[in-house]
Image (cartoon, rainbow, N blue to C red):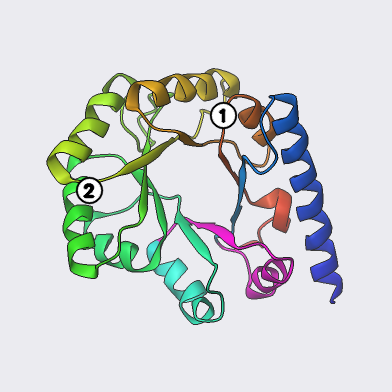
């Protein structure tokens, strides 16, 4: 085992331990939270080292970058789960459905319609999360919190989509706990059970407030190399 694999395995073990401790504190069972390794922009040697640890759930921000990184690896990893955690353009819906197992950034009616058509064309039905713009930030994607339940219902009734959960990215300048608690509350209104929330800096807090998956990048892989 290479030094890099040892280092990454140690980081992953430490994070899994913290995830387990946070779940226990919240009175939740072991295994209730999925670790999503955010692999965007990471070099191949780090990706391969992470795979060697047994990690099989990965998050990517861009369809084309993910195709380049994972197309040749997928055949040898039958238990791989790829999640799209970045914005999705409607013209890339087919490619996203063909590659990803989970799409976490459904945020508008045009995209819902495009995904429904893409699923019919590709024969694949990725699990879907609706992204909620809990901070109502103009520069971020996501439906308004007040519109989330109605949007989820339209996705189901008008487009035949199965919505599994909700996702959010809290504003950097505000306490993340407020946004995690809001997303947890919205889950009830939207009749979903899955919550994708929490990143490297705040995932234990997100777990205590109901996260079922956390998206961790730098704490797992180390800082991304400079472009």
Tell me the crowding category of disc 1: few under 14, some 14 to 19, or many 20 or more residues within 10 angstroms, Cα based.
Answer: few
Q: Is residue 120 above or below residue 201?
A: below
Assess whether residue 45 is covered by the magenta stretch: yes
Which residues fall within the magenta stretch? Answer: 41-62
Q: 151 left or right of 184?
A: left
Q: Is residue 168 above or below residue 217?
A: above
Assess whether residue 185 is covered by the magenta stretch: no
Tell me the crowding category of disc 2: few under 14, some 14 to 19, or many 20 or more residues within 10 angstroms, Cα based.
Answer: some
Residue drawn at 32 percent across, 53 percent down:
88
Dot 1 and dot 2 residues touching (CB under 8 Å): no
**Could you tell me if residue 175 is visible in this image?**
no
Q: Position of residue 189 (x, y in %)?
A: 35, 21
Q: In front here: 226 or 215?
A: 215
Residue drawn at 21 percent across, 39 percent down:
156
Identify the disc placed on residue 172: 1
Q: Position of residue 60 (x, y in %)?
A: 49, 58
Label 2 element class: helix
Which quadrant holds the N terminus? bottom right
Give the mark count: 2
Q: In front here: 103 or 61?
A: 103
Q: Is residue 27 above or below residue 39?
A: above
Which quadrant holds the C terminus? bottom right
- What residue is pinned by disc 2? 111
Q: Position of residue 151 (x, y in %)?
A: 23, 31
Q: Is residue 208 above or below residue 40?
A: above
């Amino acid at each position: 085992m290479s030094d890099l694999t040892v280092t990454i395995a140690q980081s992953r073990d430490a994070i899994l331990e913290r995830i387990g401790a946070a779940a226990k504190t919240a009175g939740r069972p072991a295994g209730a939270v999925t670790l999503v390794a955010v692999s965007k922009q990471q070099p191949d040697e780090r990706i391969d080292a992470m795979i060697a640890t047994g990690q099989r759930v990965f998050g990517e921000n861009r369809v084309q970058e993910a195709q380049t990184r994972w197309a040749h690896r997928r055949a040898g990893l039958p238990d791989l789960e790829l999640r799209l955690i970045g914005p999705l353009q409607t013209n890339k819906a087919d490619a996203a459905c063909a590659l990803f197992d989970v799409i976490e950034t459904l945020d508008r009616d045009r995209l819902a319609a495009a995904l429904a058509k893409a699923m019919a064309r590709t024969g694949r039905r990725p699990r879907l999360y609706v992204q909620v713009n809990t901070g109502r930030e103009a520069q971020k994607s996501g439906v308004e919190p007040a519109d989330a339940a109605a949007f989820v219902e339209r996705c189901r009734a008008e487009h035949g989509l199965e919505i599994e959960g909700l996702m959010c990215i809290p504003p950097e300048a505000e306490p993340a706990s407020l946004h995690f608690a809001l997303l947890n509350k919205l889950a009830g209104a939207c009749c979903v059970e899955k919550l994708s929330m929490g990143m490297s800096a705040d995932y234990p807090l997100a777990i205590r407030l109901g996260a079922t998956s956390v998206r961790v990048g730098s704490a797992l892989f180390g800082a991304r190399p400079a472009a």
